[in-house]
Image: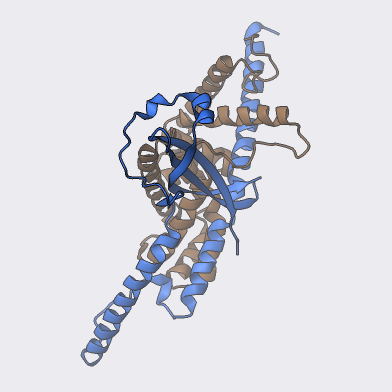
Amino acid sequence: LGDALHVQLVIRSRRGDAGAFADLVDAYERVALAVAYSVTSDAGGAGDVVQDAFLRAWQRVADLKEPEKFGAWLCGIVRNLAIDAVRARAVRAAVHGQRNDNGFGGPIDAGPEFAVAQDDGPLEQLDLRDRRDRVAQALQRLDEVSRSALVLRYYENLSSRQIGELLGLASTAVDMRLMRARRQLRGFLVELDDRSGEPTFARGSQSAGEV
Amino acid sequence: MSPDMNDENDDGERYAKLDATLRGFLGAELDGQRGRARTAFETHVTRRSTRPLPAGGALVRGRPARSRAWVIGLAGAGAAMAASLAAVWAVPMFTRNTVSTTTTMTSIDAGVNPHRESTSRPGDTSGQSASAETDWRPVQQVTRTATVDQGLVLVGGTAPARVFRRVSTESTEWFDRERNVRVETTVPRERVMLIGVDTY
């Protein structure tokens, strides 16, 4: 991200080269999804936001002064749109009496299952869905910046320096946040597993009563 | 091996498991959304390409020549009007989470005036036995429906579908001619529909 090739793509996009911008969409889509998901905590909502964000970026790319900062600029657009979307959903949820913690999702969750195999039985699928919900719940308990850093690291495999450039943080601050976030996340998962009484992946192969 | 080293190894193993869990979770959550942005962008560009646009969709800067100013002004006004009309037409089609409400009223028994005041209390008729002994007829039915567009979801991780939640109450007014009693029953219903979305 942010290398010479991408800078060239940004410069060409500023001149109206739609093909170059389409390549930027491919290059930055995962980053944008990670940032949007960190705010919305909902994959479908993040997809909507990213779609809108790239269209908005295309309309404004001619105004971008520093092509090498395209990533950070795009992340700003994504984050703002995601915050707007969460607010709008929260208002609608309040009006329609839905029980949404984050403003997205609601009682229907037809999103992709967490590693569900086609031949899994209903109990296995239920168990996997429970695990997925617990990870999502634990992630939501982190602060937004730490969550963004964590999602960018684990979804897009970015270095601390790259994450720092996108989020406007020093790489040491990113390292610190990642370390804390992992520790917190493990704690949250253990706590959630204790409540549910289910065996946990957060504790490795140990059963719930062994720690 | 000392207990401390054991703890360290356990910790390493637990964090490795946590890392693998996070990667698996995020991949399963977000990979289904990939490709949407490019498709949307290409569609946007294709639609706009019928009318040549300035670079990057940016506005043309600088002052137009005086002689052409009025032509541009006129064209601008026309375009603005067309855009307003298009927006009025398109907004209901593309707005997500819109709520549409409908109320339908059906008079079922034309021989009975549904608005006539009853002389006895509806509470006098209690339960099925009363209903069986008397001649209850439906007089009027009112259905109130609210439909909420809840946005897009991916069914099975691959098939995009739009979720519509339809909540309705069906109120039926019943009348017993013999005892001149009217009763209203209300049945709430809720349906969730997934409508497949064509991707292009």
Residue A71 pos. (x, y %): 45, 53
From this viewpoint, is residue B76 visible? yes
Looking at the image, residue B79 sits to the left or right of residue A205; the answer is left
Up the image or down, B87 lies above or below B182; here it is: below
Q: Nearer the viewer, residue B16 or B43?
A: B43
| The colour assigned to chain A within the rendered structure | brown
Seen as rendered, the residue at the extreme top is B3
Hey, which quadrant is residue B118 in on the image? top left
Which residue occupies 49% across, 24% down? B127
Residue A23 pos. (x, y %): 56, 63
Seen as rendered, the residue at the extreme bottom is B67
Say how many tags the image has: 0
Which residue occupies 46% across, 59% down? A54
Q: Nearer the viewer, residue A185 or A207?
A: A207
Which residue occupies 36% across, 37% down? A94
Looking at the image, residue B88 sits to the left or right of residue A98; the answer is left
Q: Nearer the viewer, residue B119 or B183?
A: B119
Residue B110 pos. (x, y %): 43, 52
Q: Which chain is blue?
A: B
Up the image or down, B136 lies above or below B94; here it is: above
Residue B162 pos. (x, y %): 54, 52
Up the image or down, B21 lies above or below A84; here it is: above
From this viewpoint, is residue A162 visible? no
Give the quarter of the figure containing the C terminus of chain A.
Answer: top right
Seen as rendered, the residue at the extreme right is A119
Colouring method of the image: by chain
Which residue occupies 38% across, 60% down? A66
Q: Nearer the viewer, residue A203 or A40?
A: A40
